Amino acid sequence: MEELFSYLVVGLTRGLIYGILALGLVLVYKGTKILNLAQPFFGLLGAFLCWWLTARAAFLPFDQMTRPRMLVAALITIVLVALNGISLEKSLFHRLRNAPRLVTLVATLAIGQGTVGLVTILFSRNQRQAETLRIIPTGLRNIVELGDVNLTGGDLQTIIVVPLVAVALAMYFKRSRFGVAIRAAAENADAARLLGVSVDRVSMFVWAAGSALAALAGILLAAKDGSLQVSTLSEGFLVKALAAALIGGLTSLPGALVGGLTVGIGEAIISGYFSDTIGASDLVFFVAVVLLLAFRPQGFFGQRDDAEDTAAFVPAIRDLPRRLQETAYPLVFGWGGKFTFVFFALAVSWVTGSATNDVLTQVMILAMVGVSLTVVMGYTGQISLGHWALAGVGAFSAANLFGRLHVPFLLTLPLVFVIGAVISLAIGLPALRIKGLYLAVVTVTFSYAAELFLFKSDVFGGGTSGRPMPAPQLGPLDLDDPSNRPLFVLTLALLLVSMALARNVLQSRVGRSFVALRENEKAAATLGVRLAPTRLLAFALSGGIAAVAGLLFAVRVGTVNNTDFHTQTSLLLVLMVIIGGLPTLSGPLLGSFVVFGLPFLLKFDNAWIIPIGTGILTIVCLTRLRGGLAGLLLRARQSTIEALVEIEEQPGTPVPSRA
């Protein structure tokens, strides 16, 4: 009983922080219908800014690292992060106001990754900065004893501040005129606009308030924990905030606090009673989120949201005009491009060393995962934020089958594909009842649970030491060759096979069902498309391809560990395919080379250049460059073919025919 009480007390303070973070997330969602995945990263930015203002800034009053200095720094930080939220709303989300919700979801994901890169370049550029101990002083010195639990100043600060902020917000929304207007706009924006409510002002306010609450949550958590780490305030913070918001309901502000307390207390109890099982609480939260969304997607306090989600981030890539299709040029450009790519890739691999071959192999592996994402996102209109975890399933499965059980490699390869398909089916089963935004939440929660539980387990992941994956000998291909060239050749071949498989599926009757499902589910069902089997088939195919990519990754690294499969990589992969260009199959390859290949080949500091560059490029693709890099190439191809046809159509010059 005493243990349970101590867990409740410990979970209380952490749950209040999760609740205030979720409160900001729900506030933005109610006001704009945008699920802001950048919310915890605003907390990360706020915590680091507050620390710098407290410990390093020379222009603030009071001595450094004192409590008065911290209070001033916290207020300045909250204002700055709130202004950042307003600037994002005015410069980006105002333009995307009429865009489908999945477009804005990807945009917030890009903003979040850019924020991670910004924090890295400002505060962790080198090893000395990364190893700096950062502490935010607490506003209270007292220590209160409750049985066997000592509540520190950080705990007491949280217990006092969070309820005060929640009550102040509740009073504002209930009593103030503008607060009532915000509630009206959240319920029905069109009706509120007719009554004179400025939707623009409401949107700016909720972005400012949501960002400010995120900054407050980050500061409180850093002060409570006694140190400031990027890992504490990033993907894990996101998963906890999403779980809290979903438990309470994405449309309920009080529910966010209740959900936060539920998550915090549940995390403390599970971690306390199952301390020997690493990641047990994350596994429980994944299962809880799936069950909750499957049977009560509105949460315990929210209202059901039946808005239809479509993957309109997939641009309409137009076919060539009919008069151009009837020429031989499209066929020449198509096959010519494929042969040129293969020849160039093999030539570069042949003339370069092992380091370049290793980078190119990594690019091909990530491109293969991008192909699997294209099947889900580009073909069926669903969004997955956990595909790198599916690659992890394939990597550990291969290490267990080939490295541990000595199953022949040529048999391991199809078995890994099947295992990936089965696991993806299990994750996709909620897609029968969950789609769009909610499915994205399920997949990111799975990725985090897999990283911290499944891949750390002794049975599957080999514990913290990981699983060895010896490199096999495949006839003339010695995958353990120091030049890394044979592994690159195999990876290139399997990438081409996966692209051919995806293309053939798209051109089949099943592929047409995928596209019909993406464009309009109701119309597809009317035309006889079986929605559930079609969606599950897409998940299975996608998971199988991702798992094979994971097998190749395992061969590349030699020993697979849970640290190889961070949730952040899953998030970056989604942005990668957007940059490359959906729904083309060349897009993942282009995106992988630009996002992951170039920084390594040019020897940039990848810790910040990848998230910042990826975030910026994604925003550019969403707002100005629909179709990504592949769209640019397709438009260039059409212009070239049109020019050639115009030359051929000059008087007296016959036009070459496909026949």
Image (cartoon, rainbow, N blue to C red):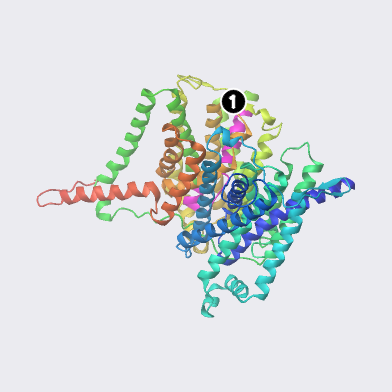
Q: Residue at x 45, y 25 (%)?
A: 355
Could you say which quadrant of the image residue 279 lies in? top right
Frontmost residue, 542 versus 101: 101
Residue 5 in the image, given as x and y percentages of width and height: 86, 50
Magenta run includes residue 39: no
Frontmost residue, 494 versus 302: 302
* Residue 64 appears in the picture as rendered: yes
Q: Residue at x 51, y 48 (%)?
A: 114
Could you say which quadrant of the image residue 547 lies in? top right
* Residue 290 appears in the picture as rendered: no
Neighbor class of circle 1 (other Cα within 10 Å; few <14, some 14-19, many 20+) is many
Give the magenta-colored segment's residue range: 374-401
The amino acid on which the numbered mark 1 sits, given as a three-letter code, is Met
244 with respect to 573 (left or right): right
Classify the position of the C terminus by image quarter.
top left
Residue bearing mark 1 = 469
Residue 153 in the image, given as x and y percentages of width and height: 76, 50
Frontmost residue, 320 versus 350: 350
Residue 389 in the image, given as x and y percentages of width and height: 59, 40
Q: Residue at x 62, y 63 (%)?
A: 27
What type of secondary structure mainly makes up the magenta span?
helix
Residue 154 in the image, given as x and y percentages of width and height: 74, 49
**Dot 1: element:** loop
Could you say which quadrant of the image residue 446 lies in? top right
Q: Single out the residue that lies furthest toward the front.
A: 62
27 with respect to 334 (left or right): right
Magenta run includes residue 383: yes
